[in-house]
Image (tube, rainbow, N blue to C red):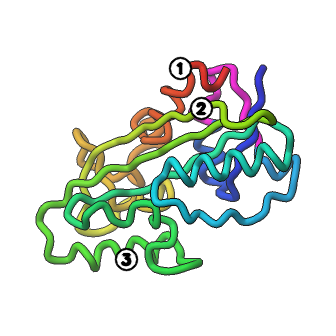
Amino acid sequence: MPTYFLASQNLHKLIEMQAILQDSGVRLRPLSEMIQMPEIDEDGDTFLANAVKKALTGARLSSCFVLADDSGLEVAALDGEPGVHSSRYAGPGSSDEQNTAKLLRCMQDITCRQARFVCVLAVAGPEGLVGTAEGEVRGRIALEPKGHGGFGYDPVFIPDGYEQSFAELSEECKNQLSHRSRALEMALQIGLLQ
């Protein structure tokens, strides 16, 4: 069974990705089992640039195959914000609740609420970058947070075709719809993870 190490300090992300991959034959472990990963400055202008930087850094330091992702929320009416700054939208070290509160303040008088979650995955090994895969899910931003599941902007993101936020949907349902699930499915289809 192939093992990849996830370059992320986000335990929610690791658990979600492990659940999505559970029937694939791919094993995902935290990179912290191998090395003490330094804080990576996510200074890229795109999700792709940040994911590749994290994967290459992790692979170089560990000599293992490393999976990294960069993901976030893009709101059409906010010209794609929060985008690559999704995890620190309200400032460095901001909490999920603070980021969500800022988003809702910025959208207070906006009626066009279309948005999408984007996830870009990068896999790197000792020889360098192996490849990348991307997934997205489209939806809209709710007027207020609803639900207690998930993390990040899940309480305010309602996927197309649903009336519940990601935080209200079951974990199983969210994992079938999510941008991360779609990126992982693409990675499996193209042989990036095998």
First in sequence: mark 2 vs mark 3:
3
Q: Amino acid at mark 2?
A: Gly
SS of the residue under disc 3: helix
Residue for point 69% across, 25% down: 26
Residue for point 49% across, 26% down: 186
First in sequence: mark 2 vs mark 1:
2
Spot the residue most to the left: 111
- Label 1 sits on residue: 190
SS of the residue under disc 1: loop
Query: Image quadrant of residue 82?
Result: bottom left
- In the image, taking residue 110 as reference, residue 188 lies left or right, namely right
Chain part drawn in magenta: 19-29
Query: Which dot marks residue 101?
Result: 3
- In the image, taking residue 3 as reference, residue 50 lies left or right, namely left
- Label 2 sits on residue: 131
First in sequence: mark 1 vs mark 3:
3
Q: Amino acid at mark 1?
A: Ile
The reply to whether the C-beta atoms of the residues labelled 2 and 1 are less than 8 Å apart is yes
SS of the residue under disc 2: strand
- In the image, taking residue 23 as reference, residue 2 lies left or right, namely right
Distance from disc 1 to disc 3, alpha carbons, whole Å, reads: 38 Å
Which mark is nearer the camera, 2 or 3? Answer: 2
Distance from disc 2 to disc 1, alpha carbons, whole Å, reads: 10 Å
Between 9 and 172, the residue placed more toward the observer is 9
